[in-house]
Image (cartoon, rainbow, N blue to C red):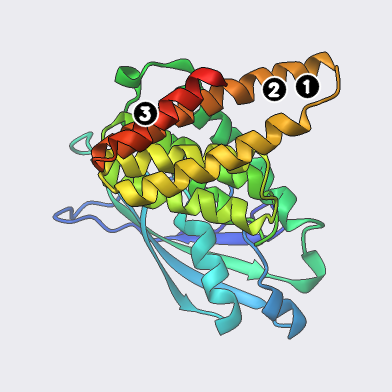
């Protein structure tokens, strides 16, 4: 058994118990700290009720060091889910069986201490410190490679970024979270996983809708991506609605860029390019629905942007 004091704002001591199938010898040592410190969010309800204490978790880790399941063994009920949520996204250095030299799974028991006198100054800031590197890694795949180069590593990086974005409080970093989800959709589209891409795209649209800013670049991007995802998933009516929503947003953005400022001119040119592409995509969707006349009208509008 190993016990070590943790350094983050939520002090934690980790007790390790390792179990191996068909192994009788003493297990090899494993690091008791995750490779990335989990962002533990103190539940608002628990803070209001002045609840504090320790939650013991049992964490199952696969041979790659990724967490496969987390179970709260005990601790205050109002604190258990926060501890489980945080460690669900943890990763550990893989454990190697000393006899065979092969990676092997492990079970780690972790104690997470919630103390009202040691609350972090800004929970969202702590989450953001972990979210930004994950999102940057995801975007490096999305921006830096061709569709044929987007791999399972890219998918995993983008999934981790989205998972971490769920740790923000409901109203925090909405556009950044929408961008993370949008990037995940692009990776899924590149891998031709169209049904999942369409489902995930719903989250990006929901986030920008929650932001209550109907005409922003993030809104346009979310609807454009969902239009493409729905079209490829053969959900043509929904795709047509999304294209129309993107067209309305981009048209408004173009109209708002009236001052003779070079940066605004550059943005306007970008919006016009996006609008032409959305008209063309919308036309393809109309063709799929056997509405040739509407498709021709949309292509004509694209040529005049």
SS for tag 1? Answer: helix
The residue lying toward the viewer, choosing from 111 and 285, is 285
Crowding at mark 1 (Cα within 10 Å: few <14, some 14-19, many 20+): some
Q: Please report the residue visible at 40 percent of the width from the left and 45 percent of the height from the top.
A: 240
Quadrant that contains the C terminus: top right
Q: Which mark is residue 214?
A: none
Give residue 218's quadrant in the image. top right
Q: Determine the CA span between mark 3 and mark 1.
A: 31 Å
Residue placed under numbered mark 1 in the picture: 264
Q: Please report the residue visible at 29 percent of the width from the left and 34 percent of the height from the top.
A: 292
Instruction: Report the side of 295 relative to 34 (left or right).
Output: left
Residue placed under numbered mark 3 in the picture: 296
Q: For the residues carrying marks 3 and 2, which lies nearer the camera in this image?
A: 3
Q: Please report the residue visible at 51 percent of the width from the left and 48 percent of the height from the top.
A: 204
Crowding at mark 3 (Cα within 10 Å: few <14, some 14-19, many 20+): some
Crowding at mark 2 (Cα within 10 Å: few <14, some 14-19, many 20+): many
Residue, far bottom: 49
Q: Position of residue 223 (x, y in %)?
A: 50, 43
> Does the CB distance between marks 1 and 2 fall below 8 Å?
yes
Q: Earlier in the sequence, mark 3 or mark 2?
A: 2
Q: Position of residue 177 (x, y in %)?
A: 59, 46
Instruction: Report the side of 159 relative to 4 (left or right).
Output: left
Give residue 54's quadrant in the image. bottom right
The residue lying toward the viewer, choosing from 254 and 266, is 254
Instruction: Report the side of 60 relative to 16 (left or right).
Output: left
SS for tag 2? Answer: helix
Q: Determine the CA span between mark 3 and mark 2.
A: 25 Å
């Amino acid at each position: 058994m190993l016990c070590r004091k943790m350094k983050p704002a939520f002090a934690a001591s980790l007790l390790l118990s390792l179990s191996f199938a068909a192994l009788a010898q003493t297990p090899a040592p494993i690091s008791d700290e995750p490779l990335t410190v989990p962002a533990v969010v103190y539940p608002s309800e628990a803070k209001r009720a002045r609840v504090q204490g320790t939650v013991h978790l049992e964490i199952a880790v696969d041979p790659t060091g990724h967490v496969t399941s987390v179970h709260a063994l005990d601790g205050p009920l109002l604190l258990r889910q926060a501890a489980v949520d945080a460690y669900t996204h943890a990763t550990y250095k893989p454990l190697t069986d000393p006899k065979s030299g092969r990676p092997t799974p492990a079970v780690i028991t972790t104690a997470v201490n919630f103390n009202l006198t040691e609350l972090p100054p800004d929970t969202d800031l702590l989450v953001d410190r972990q979210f930004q590197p994950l999102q940057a890694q995801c975007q490096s795949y999305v921006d830096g490679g061709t569709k044929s180069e987007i791999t399972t590593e890219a998918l995993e990086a983008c999934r981790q970024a989205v998972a971490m974005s769920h740790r923000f409080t409901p109203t925090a970093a909405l556009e950044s979270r929408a961008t993370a989800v949008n990037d995940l959709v692009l990776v899924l589209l590149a891998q031709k996983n169209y049904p999942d891409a369409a489902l995930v795209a719903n989250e990006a649209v929901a986030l920008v809708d929650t932001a209550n800013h109907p005409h922003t670049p993030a809104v346009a991007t979310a609807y454009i991506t969902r239009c493409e995802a729905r079209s490829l998933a053969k959900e043509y009516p929904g795709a047509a609605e999304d294209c129309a929503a993107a067209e309305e947003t981009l048209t408004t953005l173009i109209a708002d860029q009236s001052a003779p400022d070079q940066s605004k001119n550059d943005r306007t040119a970008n919006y016009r390019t996006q609008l032409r592409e959305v008209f063309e995509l919308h036309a393809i969707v109309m063709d799929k629905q056997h509405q040739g006349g509407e498709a021709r009208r949309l292509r004509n509008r694209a040529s005049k942007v």
